[in-house]
Image (cartoon, coloured by chain):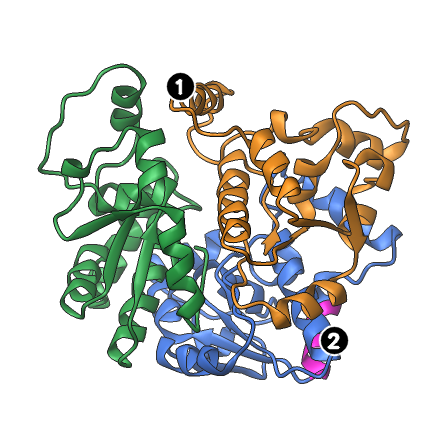
Chain colours: A green, B blue, C orange
Amino acid sequence: MVVFSGDLDKAIASFIIATGAASMGKEVTMFFTFWGLNILRDPAIHVSKSGMARLFGWMMPKGADKLHISKMNLAGMGTSMIKRIMKQKQVDSLRQLMQRAKEMGVTFVACSMSMDIMGIRREELLPDVEVAGVASYLAEAEEGNLNLFI
Amino acid sequence: MVVFSGDLDKAIASFIIATGAASMGKEVTMFFTFWGLNILRDPAIHVSKSGMARLFGWMMPKGADKLHISKMNLAGMGTSMIKRIMKQKQVDSLRQLMQRAKEMGVTFVACSMSMDIMGIRREELLPDVEVAGVASYLAEAEEGNLNLFI
Amino acid sequence: MVVFSGDLDKAIASFIIATGAASMGKEVTMFFTFWGLNILRDPAIHVSKSGMARLFGWMMPKGADKLHISKMNLAGMGTSMIKRIMKQKQVDSLRQLMQRAKEMGVTFVACSMSMDIMGIRREELLPDVEVAGVASYLAEAEEGNLNLFI
């Protein structure tokens, strides 16, 4: 599964599919690229950067709790509504879904080329995230029987 | 096929692929989740809701005729242009595509978890729509030879 | 691979995956539909059109160099930042990626129905682009072992 998007709703969908598949005994690899990298950023880590990498780092959401929904965000109102409803309905939050995915053995891979373009360094990402290139994704995808681009 | 998007253009693309595949004798299941649920809302049904479910129900497009395109919408102008052109070129409208898909035996499944989050009830959706969870989608996807996330 | 999106970032991702797969010896077909057609428009060609086809032609980006990123575009600033960074990091530009893909034998197919709706004519597209319908895509997809909708 390629996670290109950094929207909260799409991130939730991707982790629901990933944990669902893992719970059915499937081996799951999530390949995070472009905006999807923001999902993996560790909010506790501060790295000093310069130039455009700094600007990008500052403009992009830092980790799962900072993402916005893709529609009806309305200055954050839609996002907080969705989060409130999910809590109320006792649906796992994105962070809980990520935690569950990790416990179930889902592999998280960050795209090295996207990291380079966006100026994101290894130490900014959550621990247990692997870094690899597109060739590695393609090799995995070839063996998979479900491939999605989200 | 997962239909996550509720944009008119992506909905049209998904039904063109679905009816195309069905006409080639394939078994097709469309799994509607998040914004995609709006495509299945029946405009003739009014359900009284309260709180956030009501607000969401009111803010989201109610059925295929109310969707907007994802780009160049420009306060609805782009959307009505696309619809006018499709009519002029005698391309089926989204509602006609949905009708054809149903006649061809395409299965429509609404994601139960998304319905719960968005406060959409079974009776608001078109008849002939099944309701199921992500496990059911994954079981179907495993057997499919074409899986898309739209 | 279906390329529905005409966003710069998604176009880059699709060509990185396509050239990656081609370099691994795979046969790759990219099927461009809706906004994705804009990637294939030849900026050097001027076609006189009338009515809505003209308006659409004028509003949509004309070729790979005119695309915008899907997030943080900020009146073009984000787009030019991404392009500058890619140059600085010596990552191929979209136009170079397209060139490489063609040299590697990747097949570019434009969706005939989308062309009709958007009023895009064959002569506006880059040479070496084939034109075909959705049935042709589905026939190809059936044989593929990696299908994505981008």
The residue indicated by pointer 2 is B100
Residue depicted at x 49% and y 37%: C9
Residue nearest the observer in this picture, A149 or B89: A149
Secondary structure predominantly adopted by residues drawn in magenta: helix
Residue numbers of the magenta segment: B96-104
Residue depicted at x 79% and y 49%: C130
Q: For numbered disc 1, what is the local secondary structure?
A: helix
Circle 2: residue type: Arg
Whether discs 2 and 1 lie on one chain: the answer is no
Q: Residues within 10 Å of mark 2 (few under 14, many from 20)?
A: some
Say which mark, if any, is on residue C88. Answer: 1
Residue nearest the observer in this picture, A107 or C117: A107
User: How many numbered dots are placed on residues in this image?
Assistant: 2
Can residue B136 be seen in this snapshot? yes
Residue depicted at x 59% and y 70%: B42
Q: Is residue C14 above or below residue A117?
A: below
Circle 1: residue type: Gln
